[in-house]
Image (cartoon, grey):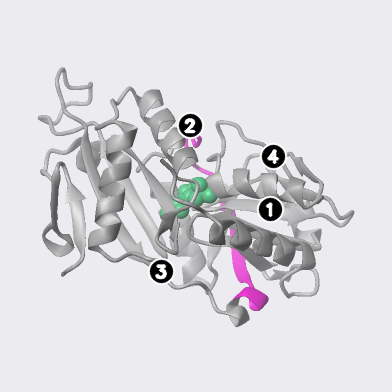
Amino acid sequence: MPRQAYVNGRYCPHNEAAVHIEDRGYQFSDGVYEVVPVAKGVMVDEDPHLDRLERSLRELRIDMPMSRAALKLVSRELMRRNALTNGIVYMQVTRGVAPRDHKFPKAATPALVLTTRQMKPPSAQKLAEGVRVITVPDIRWKRCDIKSISLLPNILAKQKAVEVDCYEAWMVDAEDRVTEGTSTNAWIVTEDNELVTRDVSNLILSGITRMRLLKLAEQAGVTFTERSFTLEEARKAREAFITSSTNFVMPVTRIDEVPVGNGHAGLVTCKLRESYEGFVGESKVSA
Ligand code: PDD
């Protein structure tokens, strides 16, 4: 069976799936999304992802397109049709279709699209080598806590990184403090061995992987602090890494030409990656 997508009530071949030209997501980025990791055919932390989806929608005053239970059924059916084992489910909800006009339409039905993508885990070599990041000014709006599909600053920064052979860009605020990556949360282990990731606020996305890893760190007796850290601290850090639904825990081994620690994946980072992989491996289907 060819790969399928789900678009507004219908399953259809992925390469034929389409939305209306006056979908407000297409015209105004008036919508939100979620990326839920899938491991061994099970959605990881599905409920926290759906909690965040509902929150993002609430903040934009868009209704849930269907009940949470129905959304879970659709996700599972799409995963089944696509024989998805490891990868992601992508969900996007927009305010719907209406003649182009900035104000909210009086009556629009939220539009829902789901796709899946199979993904391979990184090789052991890649994990040992880690990835390189550049830093760029954070030019985003003040509601980065909403998982909006409006991602221009993020894609421009990511492209800048890729053009200099880097994997990710860390965005830096006006006080020279790292906010987060273009699609990842940023972490360091400081010179004094303190595990640090920025505290949740309107200036970053509250990552589900971040939240899970903090719980796992606590269980493993790894102490941490949720606070902002400066670019200088990051450059002097012993270890650094990024987290996201698509990267899990990925070591960062160079920041702006400066090697992090000894230039290889750090011990704390590897331990946390292992914990997260263990958690993912044990994930069960939720109701
Ligand atoms: N991005 N910060 C930003 C700006 C993000 O876009 C993401 C996720 C994260 C990490 O969140 P989580 O751990 O819930 O995946 C942090 C997804 C993967 C994406 O845009 O593809």
Q: Establish if 137 lies above or below 238.
A: above
Q: Helix or strand or loop: what does disc 4 sit on?
A: loop
- Which amino acid does the dot numbered 3 rest on? Met
Sequence-wise first label, 2 or 4: 2
- Which amino acid does the dot numbered 2 rest on? Arg
Q: Establish if 287 lies above or below 220.
A: above
Which of discs 4 and 1 lies nearer the camera? The answer is 1
- Which amino acid does the dot numbered 1 rest on? Trp
Sequence-wise first label, 2 or 1: 2
Residue 265 % position (x, y): 71, 71
Quadrant holding the N terminus: bottom left
- Mark 1 and mark 3 in contact (Cβ < 8 Å)? no
- Residue drawn at (87%, 57%) of the image: 191
Q: Which residue is mark 3?
A: 119
Q: Helix or strand or loop: what does disc 2 sit on?
A: loop
Sequence-wise first label, 4 or 3: 3
Q: Dot 2, how many residues are within 10 Å of its Cα: few (below 14), some (14-19), or many (20+)?
A: some
Q: Which residue is mark 1?
A: 187
Q: CA distance from mark 2 to mark 3?
A: 30 Å
